[in-house]
Amino acid sequence: MFIQIEPQSDVPIYQQVTQQIMEGIARGEMKPGDTLPSVRNLAADLGVNMHTVNKSYHELEEKGIITIRAKSGAIIRSTEERVLTPEQLQQIEKSLKPIVVEGMVLGATSDQIEHMMKKVFSDLQIPAEGV
């Protein structure tokens, strides 16, 4: 697993870690049942505070992406275990809305925005239907 932190970014480090772990799962670099590095090891590898990685792991657990077990660590849940709730769908839509609005204001058509979404899926090397 390769995670690159951008310290000068406006995005908090724990969110960068969370996002990059999710991208690794979406790309298939990490599979269900895989164990993430320990909080201590990942923090040392990234040169960040252990609490930062811990916060990221707990956010992933809240999203239902991983399970944290004492002595076993953080384990990636299977697709069957990751049930997409209506609330999560609503949150995804809420997160996408400002980006779509910006595109519309800049003159992008719905076809162009749809093409960009398909490109994102393609860049992650997954079918447009999902992971």
Image (tube, rainbow, N blue to C red):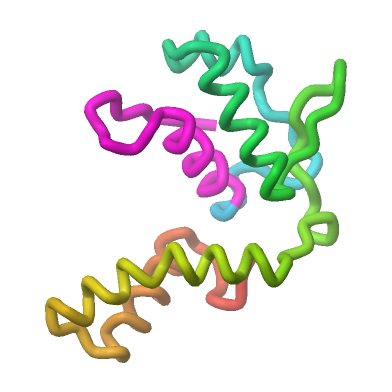
Residue visible at 60% across and 12% down? 41
Considering only vertical position in the picture, is 9 above or below 7?
below
Residue visible at 55% across and 63% down? 91
Q: Is residue 31 left or right of residue 127?
A: right
Check residue 83 for magenta coloring.
no
Q: Is residue 45 left or right of residue 72?
A: left
Q: Is residue 101 left or right of residue 29?
A: left
- Among the 4 quarters of the image, the one containing residue 87: bottom right
* Depth check, front residue: 24 or 95: 95
- Among the 4 quarters of the image, the one containing residue 26: bottom right
Quadrant location, the N terminus: top right
Q: Which residues are magenta?
A: 1-25
Q: How many marks?
A: 0
Residue 37, position in %: x, y? Answer: 65, 22
Check residue 13 for magenta coloring.
yes
Quadrant location, the C terminus: bottom right
Residue 15, position in %: x, y? Answer: 46, 37
Residue 46, position in %: x, y? Answer: 45, 17
- Among the 4 quarters of the image, the one containing residue 12: top left
* Depth check, front residue: 77 or 126: 77
Residue 60, position in %: x, y? Answer: 65, 41
Considering only vertical position in the picture, is 58 above or below 51?
below
Considering only vertical position in the picture, is 125 above or below 53?
below
* Depth check, front residue: 60 or 4: 60
* Depth check, front residue: 87 or 19: 87
Considering only vertical position in the picture, is 1 above or below 92?
above
